[in-house]
Image (cartoon, helix red, strand yellow):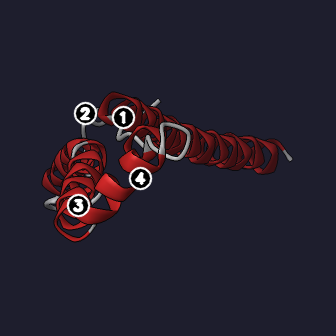
Amino acid sequence: AMGQKDNNPLWPGSVELAQKLMMYTVLSVPLMLFPKPFILLWQHNRAEKQAQAKGHRLLEDAESAGPSSGGHGHGEEFEFGEIFIHQIIETIEYVLGTVSHTASYLRIWALSLAHQQLSLVFFQKT
């Protein structure tokens, strides 16, 4: 129970620093979410073009050999939606972990404050 106003900053500029850090935290979520799936898509498309340029004759040979040996391209299809959903899940896990760790440290901090106040009362009464 402080007699001062409740929004007393820790030091001059601490509120601005906290707001800036919070903004960076919020902006880091799209940075975790979007680049990786699109980079993987770009790498896959580039590798596919190189394979088409190099292995066009190989594909014709495989088709002439019969349908059992063909179908190389269907085995490793690039599922962009699946990769994007996986990245969404990883991002959610990271955000939940960050919130969980923050809550845990706040709990420890609250425990230390309560301990300090109880000690203060104890020493005042004895």
Q: Nearer the viewer, mark 2 or mark 4?
A: 4
Q: Which residue is mark 4?
A: 62
Q: Are marks 2 and 1 in contact (CB under 8 Å)?
A: no
Q: Which residue is mark 3?
A: 56
Task: Decide: few, some or many residues near mark 3? Use Cα within 10 Å; few <14, some 14-19, many ≥20.
Answer: few
Q: Nearer the viewer, mark 2 or mark 3?
A: 3
Residue type (three-letter) at the residue carrying disc 3:
His
Q: How far apart, in angstroms, are the residues tagged by discs 3 and 4?
A: 10 Å
Q: Nearer the viewer, mark 3 or mark 4?
A: 4
Q: Nearer the viewer, mark 1 or mark 3?
A: 3
Q: Are marks 4 and 1 in contact (CB under 8 Å)?
A: no
Q: Are marks 2 and 3 in contact (CB under 8 Å)?
A: no
Q: Position of residue 45 (x, y in %)?
A: 20, 53
Give the label on residue 28, or none. Answer: none
Residue under the point 27% across and 48% down? 25
Q: Which residue is mark 2?
A: 5
Query: In the rendered image, which quarter is residue 5 located in?
Result: top left
Q: Position of residue 64 (x, y in %)?
A: 38, 48
Task: Decide: few, some or many residues near mark 1? Use Cα within 10 Å; few <14, some 14-19, many ≥20.
Answer: few
**Is 5 placed above or below 16 here?**
above
Of the residues under marks 2 and 3, which one precedes in the sequence? 2
Residue under the point 20% across and 67% down? 50
Q: How far apart, in angstroms, are the residues tagged by discs 1 and 3?
A: 23 Å
